[in-house]
Image: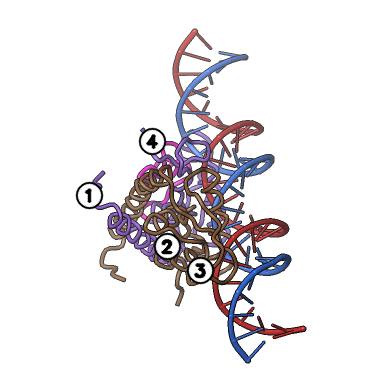
Chain colours: A purple, B brown, C red, D blue
DNA sequence: GCATCTATATGCGTGTGACATATACAGGAG
DNA sequence: CTCCTGTATATGTCACACGCATATAGATGC
């Protein structure tokens, strides 16, 4: 059974269709708003938003760096406590504003998908899956 | 006021975030299922699914060709009737199956967005926009 | 002849993400 | 001491998707 996985080399005929561009960004921001965290932690928390078990570290770290460049998050090195040093991120005011902006975009997206599904059900009545 | 436009060089800070990869594909298939049509016609009908007035012709024609390569649509040249010749597309059985597959993917996507918005509203209570 | 509308098609550049790999510290097992 | 595993961050590479620009061409009207 196809699980509509997000992957380029999967067998799903609409492979990649589950990708919403840069959706990881608002997810990271919201997680950090709720609680400052480091990348590795976020990597695991992302499952909450439907990112597969073990999201791509590259995706997470690169987006965190990029958000920091733009001033939407800030970070500080955290040594001690065992294990390698880690960078603890927190959202800035600008980052908080960005969350709200993304929320609007996501509402728009959801409406588009809802419109499609409505039209789909109109075209295929009696098809309950 | 920012309209969360789908564009790479817009001013929207989540520019591109409104893009759902290959979302145009199920839209084309559903339009063609409802009524066989040629590309130029689809180009205009796509507004129904939230594609901006005057969607990119390149996007439409390339995807139609690709769908035909994979056997999800078929086409025949249509001459006569004034104006240049046009290609009339229709969905195949395989294409119809693909619509259902995409519908599942889109439901999954919608759930992900809904989860995000739920978490967002939990984190920012009393924020009605 | 020239502009316009209809209609299809291709070229180019950039951003994005999946996947792979590199690096390094710490703790435990053998 | 060495090896392995787990934690943690970072970069390289590659393919692809799309926005934007451009090319081509028939038909119609001025």
Chain to which the residue tagged by mark 2 belongs: A
Give me the residue at 47% from left, 53% from top.
B25
- Distance of label 3 from label 1 (alpha carbons): 40 Å
Membership of A40 in magenta stretch: yes
Q: Tell me the SS state at disc 2.
A: helix
Q: Position of residue A34 (x, y in %)?
A: 35, 54
Q: In this view, which residue lies farthest toward the front?
A: B80
Could you say which quadrant of the image residue C19 lies in?
top right
Discs 3, 2 touching: Cβ within 8 Å: no
Find residue A2 and name its label. Answer: 4
Find residue A126 and name its label. Answer: 1
Q: Nearer the viewer, mark 4 or mark 2?
A: 4
Find residue B57 and name its label. Answer: none
- Distance of label 4 from label 3 (alpha carbons): 35 Å
| Residue A110 visible to the viewer | yes
| Residue A90 visible to the viewer | no
Query: Which segment did they paint magenta?
Result: A34-54
Find residue B12 and name its label. Answer: 3
Q: Do labels 3 and 1 share a chain?
A: no
Tell me: C27 left or right of D15.
left
Nearer to us in this view, B119 or B69: B69
Q: Which of marks 4 and 1 is in front?
A: 1
Q: Where is residue D4 in the image (x, y as percent from the top left)?
A: 53, 18
Give me the residue at 48% from left, 36% from top.
A10
Q: Quadrant of the N terminus of chain B?
A: bottom left
Tell me: A120 left or right of C8.
left
Mark 1 is surrounded, within 10 Å at the Cα level, by few (under 14), some (14 to 19) or many (20 or more) other residues, namely few
Mark 3 is surrounded, within 10 Å at the Cα level, by few (under 14), some (14 to 19) or many (20 or more) other residues, namely some
Q: Do labels 4 and 1 share a chain?
A: yes
């Amino acid at each position: 059974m196809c699980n509509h996985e997000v992957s380029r080399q999967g067998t799903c005929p609409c492979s990649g269709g589950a990708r919403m561009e840069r959706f990881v960004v608002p997810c990271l921001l919201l997680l950090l708003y709720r609680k400052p965290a480091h990348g590795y932690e976020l990597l695991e928390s992302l499952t909450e938003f439907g990112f597969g078990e073990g999201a791509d570290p590259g995706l997470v770290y690169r987006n965190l760096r990029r958000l920091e460049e733009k001033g939407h998050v800030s970070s500080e090195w955290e040594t001690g406590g065992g294990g390698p040093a880690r960078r603890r991120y927190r959202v800035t005011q600008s980052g908080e504003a960005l969350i709200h902006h993304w929320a609007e975009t996501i509402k728009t997206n959801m409406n588009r998908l809802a419109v499609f599904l409505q039209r789909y059900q109109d075209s295929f009545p009696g098809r309950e899956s």
